[in-house]
Every structure is written in C-alpha cells, then in structure tokens.
Amino acid sequence: MNTVDANQIKRRFLIVVLILGSAAFYVLIRYFAVMLNPPGADIFAAPRDTAERGSILDRNGRILALQTRMGNISVWRPDIEDIETLTADLSPLLESSAGEIRRAIEGSTSDFVYLKKQADQSVIQRIQGLRSQGKLTGISIEPVMGRIYPEKNLAAQVIGFTGSNNAGLAGIEYSFDAELAPRDGRNGNQIVLTIDTNVQYILEDIAGRAMEQHQAEAVMLLAMDPRTGDILGSASLPGFDPNDIQSSSENSRMDRPAIWAYEPGSTFKVFSISALLETQAIQPDTVFYCDGQYTRGDRIAIKCMGVHGTVNAGSIIVYSCNAGAAYASEQIGAAAFSQALELFGFGKRTGAGAPGETAGLFRPSNRWSERSRPTIAMGQEISVSVLQMLQAMTAVANDGILIPPRTVSRIVSDDGKTIREYHSAQPRRILSEETARNMRSYMEAGTEDLGIGSRARIRDIALGVKTGTAQMYDPAARTYSETDYIASCIALLPVENPSLVLYMVLIKPMGNYYFGSRTAAPAIREAAEALIDYLGIPRGRTPLVLHPGEITIPVEDIITIGNTVPNFAGRTKRSLAPLLLRDDLRLDIRGEGWVVRQSPPPGTPFRPGMTIILELE
C-alpha cells in the first residue's frame, strides 16, 4: 500500500469518526431536551422545588411583585424545517421582527439558542398551541420560576427587579432578598411597603406631565406622612418596566430620591434659617438689609433675585432672599452652624431601606472656606438627597420632632402572620416648638400674592411652601452652569397641623421657565389638590357632613374552583392573582379592568391542566 492510499484511509476514518461523534452528541442533546421538556408535557406542572419567592405589596395589600411560573424559549437549529415560516410564526409571540429572530438563530455559534427568557404564561400557552398543530418544529420550552410586576412601571425604582436566577438585583427585591427568597423548602416572606398605589399613580401622572411641559431631564415627586415617616408615593422619571429589564437603561432604573445627591438651592433656607433661630444666632425680629446682593469687603459674593430692602427671618423665607440668608449666616460660627444642620440629618443616610442610599456631601466645618457659610445658607455647597430633605421637613411639621422616613412597614409570612414590624428610627427633638411653628408661619406667608410660593396656593386649605432654583455645578468648567438648573418646591399641609409633605425636584428644565416658583410650585398645587381629597384631609372652608349610620364596603371573596368552572364575570384582575399560583390550572388573562368574557363558559366540568381564558375590559 502506498503512502497516498494510507492518507486517504486515515482521512476517511476521521470523517466517519466525526460523523458518528456528531450523531452521538446530537442524540445526547435531544435526550436531555426531551427529558427536560417532553412533548405534550405541562411546563407549568409543579417544579421539583415548589417554594415561592415572597410577594411585595403596597400598604393596602395590592400586589406589586408576584412569583409565577414562566418559560425560557429556545431553538435547536438542526430540527428547523423552514426558518422563514418559523420566524414568522414566532415574531408576534416574542414581540420581535422575523428578521431579528432569524439573525439571532443564524448568528449563534451554537446549535442551541435561547430566543427569550422568562416568557409569561400567555406566550407559552400560544407556543404550545402552535406546537400541538405541528408548527414551531425545533422550539423547546424550559420551565422556570419568574417574577411579574402587575403594575409595570409603577414605583419600579422602589420595588426593583430580579435576575434570571430569581435573585434580587435592585430596590426592595435586593435589599430584602434574604426575606423574600425561599429557604429550607419554605416559601419566602412577603414585604409590605408604606407606598399607596393610588398616591403613586397620582404622583407619577403629575410628574410625567411636568417633565414633558418643562422639557426636564428627570423629575422626582414624593409624598410623605410626617407624623409616621411613611413614604406614601415616590415618583421618579424617567422610569422603566421591571417586566422588561432588557429595554431599560441604567438612568431609568436609578432610584434618584435615595441615591442621587444634588444641591437643593433655596428650599434649604427652611433649615438654615431654622438652625439660626434655634441656636439664637438670630431672633425672629433681627433685620438685615438687601440691596440686591451680598457683599463681603469690596467684592460681590452672592447676587439676590431682587432688592428686598430690610428683611428678617420671615421675609427671607417669603421672598427667598439670598442676601438676607447670607448676612444671617454671619451671626454664627462655622462649627456651630455645621452642628445645627447635622441635627436635621444632612451628611448621613436616612436608613429608609433603599440600597445604595447616599449620605450626600456635607464637608466638615474645618474644611469650609470664607464663602461657605453664606453659600450653604442659601442651599449650595452642600449636596443632599430627596429623602434627607423630607426627613428634615418632619421636624418643622412635627413641632420640632424629627422622624426618619421609611418605605417598608412590615414583613409577613406566606400564611399571613406578621413576622416583623418596621418602624422609623427613634424620633428626636431638634427644634423647639416655637422655632418650628414660626417657620411654618413663614412658609404659609410665602403662598400669599407677593410670596415666592404663591403658585402653590390652594383656596380652602393653608399650605406652607418654599421653592428653590439651584445652579448645577459643571465639573468640566469647574464652575456653576449658566444653563443647567435644579428647580424644586417643598410643601406641608395643613400648615397648622401637617399630615402631608410634598416635594418636587425638576432636573435641568429647558422649557420657558426654570425657576422652581414657575415649574415645581404649580405641580405641587395639583398634587395637593388630588391628595387632599384622596387622603381625606379636611378642607378649611368645606363643610363636613356627619353620617349617623354605617357604611359597609363589600369585600371581594376568594375565588374557588370545584368540580366546575366558576363564573368569573365582573372579577377584578387583582382577585385573579391567587389562581396564577395553582399547579393544576393555566390562566390566560387578556386586557385590563374586569372580566367580561371567559372560555370555557361557567359550569364546564373542571379538569386538571385546563386552560381558562379571561378577557378583561
């Protein structure tokens, strides 16, 4: 045998070995695929580990995050019979174009390609229906446990989201992962928030319209009960849908009220002037003269928005006088001023439960410059978070008692038993009643015709308001920007005995106005009008109707399924949620609102594994 014949035999042998090896590998892969997902198998049958991640609820028990069974959709390329038909059939199911799906399949270096992870039940059921018709050859479904967020974008930054392994990656999902995650075969615990879904809807709607009107880069609008520290609503836009993390950006996922530090501007005068009054560095009747600027020596240090003449503590707040605040700050030493402001919580995290919460930036007084005291007094050269500002305002609202904010009220076991109550950190007195009440009266006067907060005024209830407009620091130019501003407005109501604090911040408004008095104050008025009615805050000039009887509010009973399919007509989407956890039922919910149609009809004999389609309007 010559050398040529020997080489040919070797090549043929290697080819045969490769063919047999590939065939064996294919058979092995298909074996495991069939074992994991045999034809006709119910992918929503109870998995080997049936423990469920705990739900996240709002203060009224409304579900904000829920465990459900989902499926990872994959394709085995050697089984594809017609890629054009396959991609066309998959396109409406995966919400991607046929071209995008084809590129994903053909661009992979592996024969096994994931096309979508954590697809919900409605998608899976439609795929199974097509497979039963002999379509979608090559497509497999891998059952997984996943997370759904019924309210989508609502309070998404507070709630957070989970990863592909169902572990928390952000927000409450991350910071309370140890409580939510199942352990030792037991279901995870439920987290009950202080957030009120209806308040959140109102705030997000108002914030969205303000963001569009003023062409702002971002907007925050929060509501808090100062008596308890409960955050009732926390709107932060732009937002994202935690059901679709891939389509979101890091910017939209940021929980700005907790982790973003900024210079607050003139809203900070509420606290700087309160600190000066409390330390008796100034008295309510101490006067200063504003000629349109604050000067030290021969140079201008700080400009004012107008010439206010003789001002005292009250008129500094009413007119937001920069010069008056700066002159007042000269009456106290740097160390004493710093210490008085630290009592409000500036420079420290509030501990409200948000992961990555910022402490802001408040430099020690021994690092202050000659300009620091007057600049800090008007709300610059100090960085704060929205949560810190809300916390500080509780001292003014509560006659001097500061109450830290909270976003979690309690942890509940899967059988409904309260495991742990979460209360705000220890309240502490930082102001006298006199100082707090004086400041509230100054803020109320700020809503009068000549006051800087007049656009937030409400006809039949007294508000205390302070607005702010802060230049943003430009790190590239190493100076304050002439075009980029932060506009804000903070309010408490009713001013005599506050039960609500509202705070709005607009980042880089680029519309016709950028002042807080023209952009944030009207939105605060709109939010106050809506929440006063929703929360039942008495209006001063609105008569109260006393009803001697009782009102019974019907409670929607829990749906049970016996031997026949029940009548779902009129059921809310929320009442259907418990059925999503059943192992013996597939529920296909379509639309929003109340059930108007169902298939199969009521009275149909119930069979395990049955699919029930509910259409809501």
Image: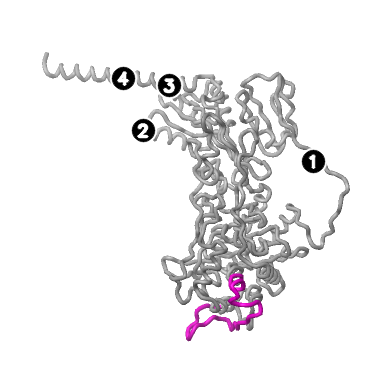
- The residue tagged with tag 4: helix, strand or loop? helix
Q: Which of marks 2 and 4 is nearer the N terminus?
A: 4
Question: Marks 1 and 3: which is nearer the front?
Answer: 1
Q: Can residue 248 be seen in this view?
A: yes
Position in image of residue 553 (x %, y %): 79, 41
Q: Are marks 1 and 4 in contact (CB under 8 Å)?
A: no
Along the line of sight, the residue nearer the viewer: 83 or 409? 409
Mark 1, other Cα within 10 Å: few <14 / some 14–19 / many ≥20 = few
Give the residue pinned by disc 1. 553
Q: Are marks 3 and 4 in contact (CB under 8 Å)?
A: no
Q: Which amino acid does label 3 sit on?
A: Phe
Magenta stretch bounds: 274-303
Position in image of residue 377 (x %, y %): 55, 72
Q: Is residue 344 magenta?
A: no
Give above or below for 548 relative to 14: below
Residue lying at the far bottom in this picture: please name it. 298
Q: What residue type is labelled 1?
A: Ile
Give above or below for 62 relative to 185: below
- The residue tagged with tag 3: helix, strand or loop? helix
Give the residue pinned by disc 4. 21
Q: Residue 109 carries which label?
A: 2
Mark 4, other Cα within 10 Å: few <14 / some 14–19 / many ≥20 = few
Along the line of sight, the residue nearer the viewer: 82 or 372? 372
Q: Residue 32 carries which label?
A: 3
Question: Marks 1 and 4: which is nearer the front?
Answer: 1
Give above or below for 468 relative to 197: below
- The residue tagged with tag 2: helix, strand or loop? loop
Q: Which amino acid does label 4 sit on?
A: Gly
